[in-house]
Amino acid sequence: MGRTYLKHGALALMLGILLSACSGPSFNMFGGQSRDEVERNRWRDEAEMQCLGLKGAMVTAFVDRKAPINGPGVCGIRQPFSLSSVGMGLADIKPAATLNCQMVVAVQHWLRTVVQPAALIRFGQPVVEVKNIASYGCRTRNNERGAKLSEHSFGNAIDIAAFKLAGGREISVKDGWDSFFGISREAGFLRAVHRESCDIFTTVLGPESDRHHQDHLHLDLAQHNSQGTHYCK
């Protein structure tokens, strides 16, 4: 089984401003936020405004600026983007992911510096498509009644189910993670991506984290605490 470990220190990505966390507000789909919740989530607006100010998520043919998403309740994104490809078409995101500014920057960085090198080392060819099964969506964590809001509720998370290589081969998290007892090229690739994602995202959950993540990798930029702790499992 996997292990949980913590990392500390600011990310180099986006000049260290893209640290985020899994503590969302208590789920109140149609209500407001308490004073404590407002204080706890102030970092969301600060991170987004810094990213937008630095033009982190540049609008290109593959990154489209969308209308603000407001609600229901406290869900939403001040300035959402639709990310459909990375690196001038190098790798497609299918379907396109609706994310906040800092997540767009993080996903682009992740594909270039984590996913592509891992694929080239193990398969000798790049990833040309990434299967996105969840980006923005107003819901609780794992869709459990009474749970806190998921980072997906703020466009601050993405779930990845599979990677397609240039030759047409698909590497799915569900089928590849434990293939040949975890020592196949597919398993090596997926486990390397999972491990190295923890240098970019503050929360990384895979098949060994719990029953809710057996078929995908969950990546988010939740701010766990002021020390910039990363939670990876």
Image (tube, rainbow, N blue to C red):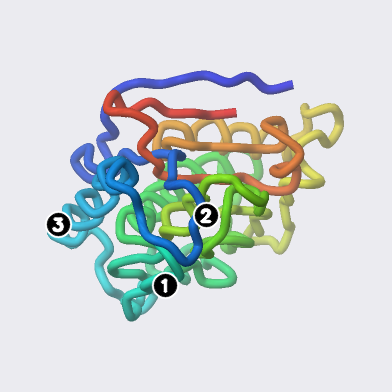
The numbered dot on residue 174 is none
Q: State the CA–CA distance, disc 3 to disc 2.
A: 22 Å
Amino acid residing under circle 1: Ser
The numbered dot on residue 158 is 2
What residue appears at the point 42 percent right and 49 percent down from the top-left corner? 112
Q: SS class of the residue under badge 1?
A: strand
Side of 80 relative to 150 (left or right)? left
Side of 188 relative to 76 (left or right)? right
* Residue 63 placement: quadrant: bottom left
Side of 125 relative to 117 (left or right)? right
Name the residue tied to disc 3: 54
Toward the viewer: 168 or 195? 195
Name the residue tied to disc 1: 82
The relative height of residue 85 versus residue 162 in the rendered view (above or below) is below
Q: SS class of the residue under badge 2?
A: strand
Q: Position of residue 87 (x, y in %)?
A: 39, 62
Q: SS class of the residue under badge 3?
A: loop
Category of crowding for the residue at label 1, using alpha-carbon neighbours closer than 10 angstroms: few (below 14), some (14–19), many (at least 20): many
Q: State the CA–CA distance, disc 1 to disc 2.
A: 12 Å
Q: State the CA–CA distance, disc 1 to disc 3.
A: 18 Å
Along the polypeptide, which appears first: circle 1 or circle 2? 1
Q: Position of residue 159 (x, y in %)?
A: 59, 53
The relative height of residue 177 versus residue 74 in the rendered view (above or below) is above
Farthest residue toward the left?
A: 53
Amino acid residing under circle 3: Leu
* Residue 45 placement: quadrant: bottom left
Residue 98 in view here: yes
Amino acid residing under circle 2: Ile
